[in-house]
Image: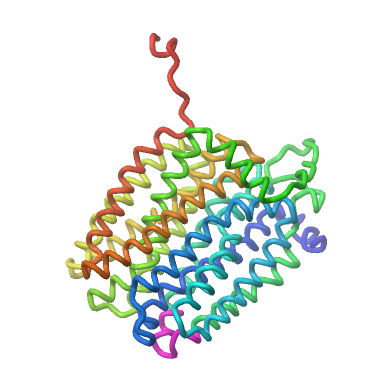
Amino acid sequence: MNWAARWVGGRFHYGWLVVAVVFLVLLAAAGTRATPSVMMVPLEHQFGWSRATISLAISVNIALYGLMGPFAAAAMQRFGVRPTLLAALATMGAGVALSALMTHPWQMILIWGVMVGGSTGVAALSLSATVVTRWFTTHRGLAMGILTASSATGQLVFLPFLAAIAEKHGWQLVVLVVAAAAAVVLPLVAFLLPERPASLKLRPFGEEPDAPLAPPAPQQNPIKLAFGALASASRTRDFWLLFFSFFICGASTNGYVGTHLIAMCGDYGMTEVQGASLLATMGIFDLFGTTLSGWLSDRFNSRVLLFWYYGLRGLSLIYLPHAFGIDFFGLPIFAVFYGLDWIATVPPTVRLATDVFGKERAPIIFGWVVAGHQLGAAFAAFGAGLLRSSLGTYTVASMISGGLCLIASFLVLRINRAPRTAGAQTA
């Protein structure tokens, strides 16, 4: 890594190379998380598994992905970013490859739910928050926006390609391709990802040249550290506002649209490749929308940004059932409108968490907020599957998801907002 630091030293700050490596890691993890949505219909046809059964495995995956966040952030403080990430990537690749042999629902729940869900939870938003707070003093919002956008880019790169493979060669080849992608990023992490700027005798990007190098954080038990942060944060109103707004964020993105949109398109006569291409189109627009959101969160009030993001997302989800009935412009309008807003909520949420809880505690506490995001996603993934199985349509699920977003748009206006004092009210 020292040779890499010398090579980039005269060109740009090494922190941007760290962002590039983590972007590729998150890209592979995003493609892995998106794979079950491509497999849903083929598994239904081959094994006769119901949508509710497959959705259960996906919901376990999503829940563990979120619950791992705070413990992953604490483990990165205790054991280091690189060892923690290498172990997670190896587990993720092995689990995905093993799933090519599954023939029973419990195997999918164990492999895709527990094994893959837990390992992808390490390569998640808590990793982004840890890297950004360590390597950047300025431009944190932009760096977080770039890393968050990797989730959308993962869908852009993987979904249409994987859907085409599933359609022509079956779902088993799909999982082998995804396992290979996880293996590719392992050497990048091993050779190009240092622990922190001080490891290369650097300062975070944007820090003053005469500022002292930051000492390593004290090593503590990661479980104790994670629960200690939760105990402290849970006594504040801002934590619960962040938690429940992000719960709704997860329910309206990964849980509902990310899991069920391809199957929903099938209900209207569209092929899996067409549904995956629609998701990929949304991914293209989210790549721009989330990066722009990071830039905006460096300059504007994060509460106001979140108000507009959640409100516009809610309106787009209420519009979704009607989009299939509009011949040409219906779904493209939804793809552009929803895609720009897909996960644009992340950079302002990280900014608010850092403002409220401080630079050192923010990654772990944000990990707990991400747990709320993924619990919401699990709730929506399973709930939408049940509603589809019982009603034969996704319309009610779309309306519920849109309504929750409108509620979240007002919740976020109260985050990090000091109560009015008697003197202020008199004035």
Please state if 183 lies on the left or on the right of 33 as rendered: right
**Residue 98 colored magenta?**
no
Q: Quadrant of the N terminus?
A: bottom right
Task: Name the residue nearer the viewer: 262 or 229.
Answer: 229
Please state if 65 lies on the left or on the right of 135 as rendered: left
Query: Eyeballing the image, is 264 above or below 19?
Result: below
Q: Which residues are magenta?
A: 162-173
Image x and y of residue 118, in percent: 57, 64
Please state if 212 lies on the left or on the right of 52 as rendered: right
Q: Quadrant of the C terminus?
A: top left
Q: Residue at x 37, y 64 (%)?
A: 382
Image x and y of residue 310, in percent: 36, 47
> Which quadrant of the view contains residue 420?
top left
Q: Residue at x 70, y 66 (%)?
A: 189
Q: Residue at x 53, y 33 (%)?
A: 235
Q: Is residue 31 visible?
A: no
Image x and y of residue 365, in percent: 58, 44
> How many marks can you see?
0
Q: Name the chief secondary structure element in magenta.
A: helix
Check the image and tell me how it is coloured.
Answer: rainbow
Image x and y of residue 341, in percent: 39, 53
Task: Name the residue nearer the viewer: 235 or 184.
Answer: 235
Q: Is residue 106 visible?
A: yes
**Residue 172 colored magenta?**
yes
Q: Residue at x 33, y 68 (%)?
A: 261
